Amino acid sequence: YNGLLKALASEGSSAQCEAVLTDMEAAGVSLTEASYSALVDAHVVSGELSEAAGVLERLRRESLEPRLRTYAPLISALCRSRRAVEARSLWREMTTDYDVAPTDDMFCAMLESLASSASQADPTPSRDFYISEFCSVLREMERCLDAMPADRLRDIYDTVSTKSNDADGRIRAEFVTLDPDDGSCSLTGVERLPSPGLDTNERRKVRSRLLD
């Protein structure tokens, strides 16, 4: 059954996945984390994010333990859809309640979503909320990962430098940069990052010096 569910999920066939789960239950086959995770994925692929969150709640009610594959597609999709508050809530649940560590892709998606939200003209709930959450995720990233690939650091740096200059002072003070000696991530002070007043070419030169 799970092989069929996985195939249907990749096509975004959420209704068919749901039908398979119904058939499994009728046949006396227990639904597992893998079964529900496939249904979450199917809803995500078809753009039904609220429905995907509902399936995750069903999984928890069945006293099953969600895994990274359960959370990752939904959190990443919420980040892409600028639903950062919902994504952050699931993130906290994932890391705190189930001790599941995010991947570097998830860190980048979460940071970009928070930075984009902070850069809106009148963000809800508030710009301060998004900045605080952004810095919190940066601290989590350093604790969870021994090393962040340089291209991922570039993605995050580009997000901050181009979308959150209004929050530059607070974010720069806690930003992650690449250690030139061992390639690891570390939180660093403002002196390691370029001024927001630099033009694009100057910023590119400084970024290259820090991260290449």
Image (tube, rainbow, N blue to C red):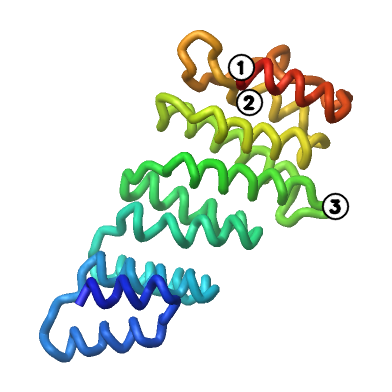
Residue type for callout 2: Phe
Report the side of 183 relative to 98 (left or right): right
Report the side of 44 relative to 115 (left or right): left
Q: Compared with residue 1, is residue 210 higher up or lower down, i.e. above or below? A: above
SS at mark 2 in the image: loop
The residue at 44%/25% (across/down) is 147
SS at mark 3 in the image: loop
Q: Compared with residue 8, is residue 204 higher up or lower down, i.e. above or below? A: above
- What is the CA distance from the residue labelled 2 to the residue labelled 1? 6 Å
* Circle nearer the N terminus (3, 1): 3
* Circle nearer the N terminus (2, 3): 3
Residue type for callout 3: Ala
Image quadrant in which the C terminus is located: top right
Residue 177 x %, y %: 59, 22
Determine whether label 2 and label 1 are within 8 Å by CB.
Answer: yes
- What is the CA distance from the residue labelled 2 to the residue labelled 3? 23 Å
Residue type for callout 1: Thr
* Circle nearer the N terminus (2, 1): 2
The residue at 69%/39% (across/down) is 159
In the image shown, does 58 or 109 lie closer to the viewer?
109
Crowding near the residue tagged with mark 1, few <14, some 14–19, many ≥20 C-alpha atoms within 10 Å: some
